[in-house]
Image (spheres, rainbow, N blue to C red):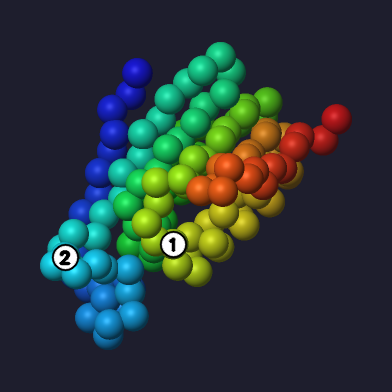
Amino acid sequence: MSEAVSLCPDTGNRTSALVQAGIGPATAGSTVNDVHLKIHPTTEGDIVTLAVSGELDDASCPMLDGCLVDHCRPGARVVLDLRSLNFMDCAGIELLHRTYARAGLEGWTFAVMTPGERFVARRRAA
């Protein structure tokens, strides 16, 4: 069992600028320094699930990308669980798109679990 990894980016990231402008994901009483991302990897059989919570933005995408690189290899089965994610900007969407494309090119299976229990999957070529 792996432990959760946490990232607390500087206040100079894109999400912080959105919060300061009043259009970001902050809730009443929160501060810009509360912005973070946690990744909790688990393995069940041959499926690796990366449960992500917090905020996925320009500052935290490199952390998730690095974690994905650690688990992605030909034949791998990776599920990215976004059900506990509070916020994702275009950098997060771009990371999902790049990962989806890589899965097809490199021969591993990638699925995304969303809050509505829907999955977007890229299956390996048979």
Total marks in image? 2
Q: Is residue 37 above or below residue 87?
A: above
Question: From the image, which quarter does the C terminus lie in?
Answer: top right
* Label drawn at residue 66: none
* Label drawn at residue 88: 1
Task: Say which label, 1 or 2, has the lower sequence index.
Answer: 2
CA distance separating discs 1 and 2: 17 Å
Write down the quadrant of residue 27 in the picture.
bottom left
Asked if one can make out residue 121 in the rendered structure from this viewpoint, the answer is: yes
Residue at which label 2 appears: 30
Question: For this view, does 88 lie left or right of residue 7?
Answer: right
Q: Is residue 99 above or below residue 16?
A: above
Write down the quadrant of residue 2 in the picture.
top left
The spot of residue 88 in percent (x, y) is 44, 62
Front residue (pair 4, 63)? 4
Q: What element carries label 2?
A: loop
Outermost bottom residue: 21
The spot of residue 4 in percent (x, y) is 29, 34
Q: What residue type is labelled 1?
A: Met
Q: Which amino acid does label 2 sit on?
A: Ser
Mark 1 nearby-residue class (10 Å; few <14, some 14–19, many ≥20): some
Q: Residue at (48%, 60%) from the top-left corner?
A: 92
